Image (spheres, helix red, strand yellow):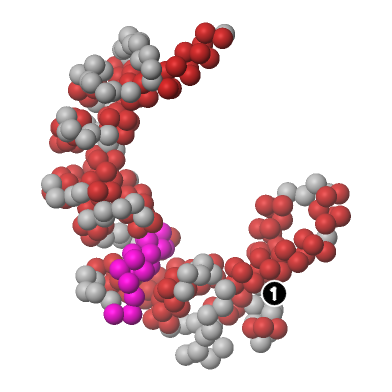
Amino acid sequence: MRQNEWNLIDFHAKFTEEYMQWCVEHQEQLQKDDADTDALFYEMYIRWLDEPKAWLEGASPRGYFTEMQDAAMLVSAFMEYILHDMEVPDPLAERLVEEADAVYPIFLNILMDDHEQQDMSAEQLDEIRAQVLPLIGEMHKPHPYVRYIQLLSVREEEDALGEQLTEALMEVADQYSNQLVQAYAYADGYGRTALLDLFSRMYGDEKALRILTDALEEPDADIVFLAGCLGRLGDPRGAEALKKLVHKPGLDYFAFKEIQNAVDELTGEQLEEQDFSGDALYEYLKGEYDEE
């Protein structure tokens, strides 16, 4: 491969094809040895990455990307795989991490740029960003957390980027309390839900407690989700807000049990069981109990 040239090859599909062919030819061995197929798949894959391939002009899959020395070229290849709905080859991801000092600034530009990209859709850009985040973690480079909060707060639907942003922010939520509160004021949809989840990780934070208990009082409150959040927050004062809901009109048995569990977790108090006759879950569990 020349320095400026490379081909978009689906390496995962190539390996899977060769692995399946091997399995067809070695069925008796697989059955006789009672082989751990998951371990076998992984072992063969690791060896395969370093085996010379005729379709790569004698290079190995790992060696194919080792020849890529230019950071911009590596990032371009990374993006092309995503834009073509192909899994990013592991050796390419390894090279991106190896060239972290040169690749990291390019990744930051991808995360920071708010201008519409003419050569890709907004959904494609989001998918690229989603796969950038874990690579930054592997590089041990600083995450731009303030930017992550901005991107998360405007997510209307749950997607890969939203999940990656939430996961990255979980470990540092308490360090960015003010920014999270500011973002929550205008967040909606999945972004709002994700921020509530992050508040539940901020043990001892008064603002987090207030936001979560206020959310419980909203007409369309997701009681099950918020009970879990308050239980995770660990502030016993959250139990009082939860107990106010046990007689709420329309409360179903599942939501009641989540409230019951959260109150127990927070204070050790056992809420008295209630009659939810007519509720499908209640009737099912009652029937199971009666049979015992």
Indicate the position of residue 41 as horizontal and vertical percent values. 68, 58
Against 268, residue 101 (above or below) is: below
Residue sitting farthest toward the front: 278
* Residue 268 colored in magenta in the image: no
**Residue 127 location in percent, x, y?**
38, 64
Task: Look at label 1 and name its amino acid.
Answer: Glu
The answer to whether residue 290 is left or right of residue 182 is right
Q: Residue at x 28, y 30 (%)?
A: 223
Q: Secondary structure at mark 1?
A: loop
Q: Quadrant of the N terminus?
A: bottom right
Q: Residue at x 34, y 66 (%)?
A: 123
Q: Quadrant of residue 89?
A: bottom right
Of residues 21 and 249, the one nearer the viewer is 249
Q: Which residue is mark 1?
A: 51
**What residue is rendered at 38% in x and 17% in y?**
278
Above or below 35: residue 117: below
